[in-house]
Amino acid sequence: MTLIRDPDAALWLVSQNRDWWDLVVRGPLGFADYGRLLFIPDPVRPHMRESDVAGVPGPSETEQIAGAVRTLAAHTTTPDECFFLVWNGWGNSPAAAPYSAPPVRVVHPPSGSAAREYYVLSGTLDDMSAWHTAGSAWTDAHDAPIPAYIWPADRAWCVTNDVDPHFATIAGTTDAIDELIAAPGFTVVRDDPDEDPPRYE
C-alpha cells in the first residue's frame, strides 16, 4: 500500500455536491443501490444508546469491512487498483506515523473550514484483508486506523465508514448490494440515501 502525495484520485468523492455530514456518513450519490453494513443492530426504540446493546463476541469492524470488500471484489474490473482514505483525526498514535502527505479535505460550508481531512492511499483490495499489516507502523489490528472510504479505480462501488455511526454505508450496483445482503459473516441491510437511517443517541 502506498501513500499518495497528489490527492486528485479522491477529488470525485470529496467534491460531491452533498452536505458534508451526509457525505462522510452516507457516502457519494449517483449509484444504483445502497446498503448499510451494521456493526451492531439498528436501535429498536427511541433514545437508545450503543451501550444499551449487549456485547456479542464476533468480528471487529475492520474484519467486517474486509469481509464486505472480499464480496465486492467480484463487482469491479480493477481489484488490483484500489484507493483508501484514512481520517487524520486518529492523532499522534503509532498508526498515524506513516502519513506525511497533505490530506484531502471535506469542506464544511459556509465557513470553508475542513470538516474532515483524510490521507489518500492506494493498494489492492487484498490489502483490506490484511489491513493491520498493510502499513509498516501498524503492529496489530488495534493500531491500524479503519479506512473511512474504500473504492476501486473503476468506481464501481464505494464503502463509507465514519467514526461516529454504528454502520458503514456501501454504494454500488443492485447485484452487489444483493450479494452483500445474502453473504454470511456480517449483516447488510438495504439503504435509501434520501432517508435518514436509525441512529443511537
Image: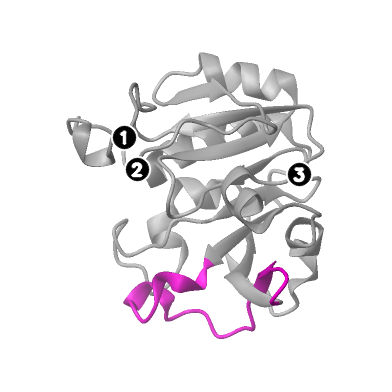
Q: CA distance from mark 3 to mark 2?
A: 39 Å
Q: Which amino acid type is marked by label 2?
A: Glu
Specify the quadrant of the image occupied by residue 116. Answer: bottom right
Residue that carries the numbered disc 1 in the rendered image:
47
On screen, residue 142 above or below 97: above
* Disc 3 residue crowd, few under 14, some 14–19, many 20+, Cα 10 Å: some
Q: Which amino acid type is marked by label 3?
A: Thr
What residue is rendered at 66% in x and 46% in y? 27
* Label 1: which secondary element: loop
Residue that carries the numbered disc 3 in the rendered image:
78
Query: Are the residues tagged 2 and 1 within 8 Å (C-beta)?
Result: yes
What residue is rendered at 66% in x and 51% in y? 23
On screen, residue 119 above or below 198: below
- Residue 91 x, y percent position in the rendering: 39, 77
Q: Is residue 9 left or right of residue 62?
A: right
Residue that carries the numbered disc 2 in the rendered image:
201
Q: Is the C terminus in the top left, top right, bottom left or bottom right quadrant?
A: top left
Query: Are the residues tagged 3 and 2 within 8 Å (C-beta)?
Result: no
* Disc 2 residue crowd, few under 14, some 14–19, many 20+, Cα 10 Å: few
Question: Going from the N terminus, do you reach mark 3 or mark 2 first?
Answer: 3
Q: Which amino acid type is marked by label 1?
A: His
* Disc 1 residue crowd, few under 14, some 14–19, many 20+, Cα 10 Å: few
Please say whether residue 108 is one of the residues in the magenta stretch.
Answer: yes
Q: Which residues are magenta?
A: 87-111
